[in-house]
Image (spheres, helix red, strand yellow):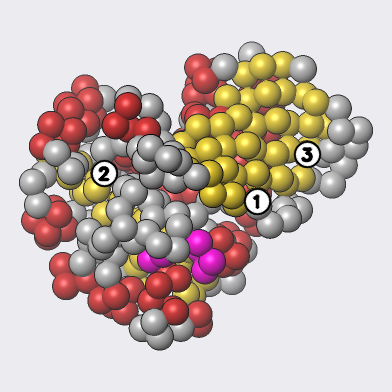
Amino acid sequence: MRILSPEEVGEALDYPSLVETLRTTFREGVEQPPRHHHTVASHAGTDGTLLLMPAWQVDRYLGVKVATVFPDNPDHGLPSVMGNYLLNDGKTGQPLALVAGQPLTNRRTAAASALAADYLAVKDASRLLMVGTGAMAPELVRAHASVRPIREVRVWGRTPASGRQLAERLTREGFDAKPEDSIKAGMEWAQVISCATMSIEPLVLGAWLQPGHHVDLVGAFKPTMRETDDTAVERAELFCDTFDGALSEGGDLVQPINDNVISRNDVLADLFMLTREQHPGRSSDKQITLFKSTGTALEDLAAAILAYEKTAKD
């Protein structure tokens, strides 16, 4: 069994390749039973989460990701999300590779947002507001830039220092990046708003949305968490990665549905439908679109296979 290091996984999962791999895999589908989602109690801080995410392609590949989410980790210099992926032969069950889960999870999550943006963001989008400064933030900027001509980036963080540090990092990568003190001001400037936070209170308000905006929501992975308010989901055309995940776990959709602000039918399509051309995605430059991501085992399996096959060729 091969062990793929974080460096090997990061090099293998370039965004153009990964976005197209996800597009194909969503179009073709895989077998994926409901993921196991367990709360891990903490006596010292915020409870953690244990995720077990199995998926397989018949007679091809079989895999499972074991991941943890501990929201307090950034306070200790650690990523919120950590884990590993075990990839097996789909015919025999033989273990093929243990794939570093941190870069795999970050890259596949960002690539799913980029895939959605390829259907939902205006074609000439070049200005992105990044809300959040954690491990996902630079990945989301890079991923969106692989499908849209993103050149200018504004970064909002809970502390000025975190926003400034990420802006400096993105500037070194070639982006015109600056810290932003105000989410409202950043939204007035941006065409794409990407959010990756652990917030339980809305940060992106519907009153600030403008025609042509695309909102990408990656944080708020529990029903009790939220990055947008009721007005935002009322004003926007709503999409998600999978109905099963987003409508049961994503607070940005679960809460307003439970409160009868919107209905299940207001969520127009998921990535299965978009990639299969069962929904056209954005139909005008004036639309406001909103994409809610909660992650799915399909994305992990697709990314693990891509990393395994590309490193085997090297």
Q: Are marks 1 and 3 in contact (CB under 8 Å)?
A: no
Residue type at mark 2 is Gly
Would residue 82 appear left or right of 135 to someone viewing this image? right
Q: Earlier in the sequence, mark 1 or mark 3?
A: 1
> Can residue 210 be seen from the camera position used here?
no
Tell which of 306 and 118 is nearer to you.
306
Q: Which residues are magenta?
A: 246-252
The Cα atoms of the two marked residues, 1 and 3, are separated by 17 Å
The Cα atoms of the two marked residues, 1 and 2, are separated by 27 Å
Residue visible at 31% across and 58% down?
200
Binning the other alpha carbons within 10 Å of mark 3 as few (below 14), some (14 to 19) or many (20 upward) gives many
Q: Which mark is residue 139?
A: none
Residue position for label 2: 132
Residue position for label 3: 62
Residue position for label 1: 36
Binning the other alpha carbons within 10 Å of mark 2 as few (below 14), some (14 to 19) or many (20 upward) gives many
Judge whether residue 247 is colored magenta.
Answer: yes
Q: Earlier in the sequence, mark 3 or mark 2?
A: 3
In front: mark 1 or mark 3?
1
Disc 2 is placed on an element classified as: loop
- The answer to which image quadrant residue 168 occupies is top left
Residue type at mark 1 is His
Disc 3 is placed on an element classified as: strand
| Residue 201, image x, y percentages | 26, 61
- The answer to which image quadrant residue 312 occupies is top right
Disc 1 is placed on an element classified as: strand
Residue visible at 90% across and 37% down?
91
| Residue 106, image x, y percentages | 46, 36
Residue visible at 46% across and 83% down?
263
